[in-house]
Image (spheres, rainbow, N blue to C red):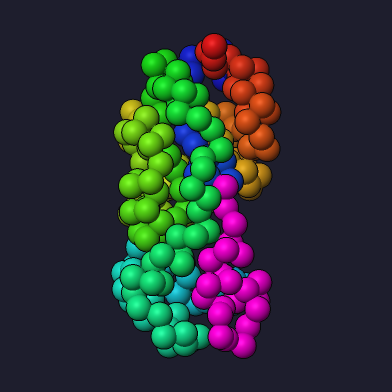
Amino acid sequence: MASTEIKGLIFDIGRVLIRIDVSRAMEGLAAGGSLSPSELWTVIEKDPRWPDWQEGRISARDWHLHLEKRFGGGLTFERFTEIWNRVLDPTPIHDDGFFKNLSKRYRLALLSNTDPIHVQYMEATYSFFGFFPARVYSCAVGVSKPNPLIYREALRALKVQAQEAVYIDDIAAYVEAAQRLGMRGIQFQSSPQLTSSLKALGVDLP
């Protein structure tokens, strides 16, 4: 497998390309409620409708109404959306030059468990998205990592075989899921580590 030419690079988004700070959003949502921000996030992640939200079976407005019914707060949808997006740090982890160089040599894709509110915000906010013509979101395809179907969708979008692709994620289990399909995998820790790991796989970087 190591001798196969690499043609595609597939990146997770959260904590790989964009820093995530859940507390910033939860502080806004928890204001005036009985739960602390950390308690609120735990409850939301365990909400029976969380998979539906992440996999596109519930609309953004219905998700807002669902949380309002559970926790109150009286937020308008517009205010809720603004607070929900605070989880995403506006300054990306890597500069655009990194992706510009990669895009000259490789096909680039995004693969993320995410929701439609974050998708709309990210695509409007981060210029590096322009280097990723292939974007596979759990909320758009109806499945989440580590389901093999979402990885296969990314490969299909890039028009590459598994052995021709590298997958980068901060979560080990998601990297391992990609490797089981035949992709090479990198568990992201830092920008220098990513560069070193890509070079070690034979990715051409300046």
**Along the line of sight, the residue nearer the viewer: 126 or 144:** 126
- The span shown in magenta is 19-40
Residue at 57% in and 53% down: 20
Q: Eyeballing the image, is 151 above or below 47?
A: above
**Along the line of sight, the residue nearer the viewer: 153 or 136:** 136
Specify the quadrant of the image occupied by residue 55. bottom left
- Residue 53 visible in the picture: yes
Q: Eyeballing the image, is 117 above or below 96?
A: below
In the rendering, at what x and y percent does residue 46 appear? 57, 73
Residue at 62% in and 88% down: 34
Residue 119 highlighted magenta (yes or no): no
Location of the C terminus by quadrant is top right
Left or right of residue 30: residue 111? left
Location of the N terminus by quadrant is top right
Residue 29 highlighted magenta (yes or no): yes
Residue at 35% in and 46% down: 123
Q: Eyeballing the image, is 70 above or below 203?
A: below
Q: Eyeballing the image, is 203 above or below 160?
A: above
In the rendering, at what x and y percent does residue 88 appear? 50, 53
- Residue 63 visible in the picture: no
Specify the quadrant of the image occupied by residue 33. bottom right
In the rendering, at what x and y percent does residue 72 appear? 47, 87
Residue at 56% in and 78% down: 30
**Along the line of sight, the residue nearer the viewer: 200 or 60:** 60
Label total for image: 0
In the rendering, at what x and y percent does residue 13 appear? 50, 44
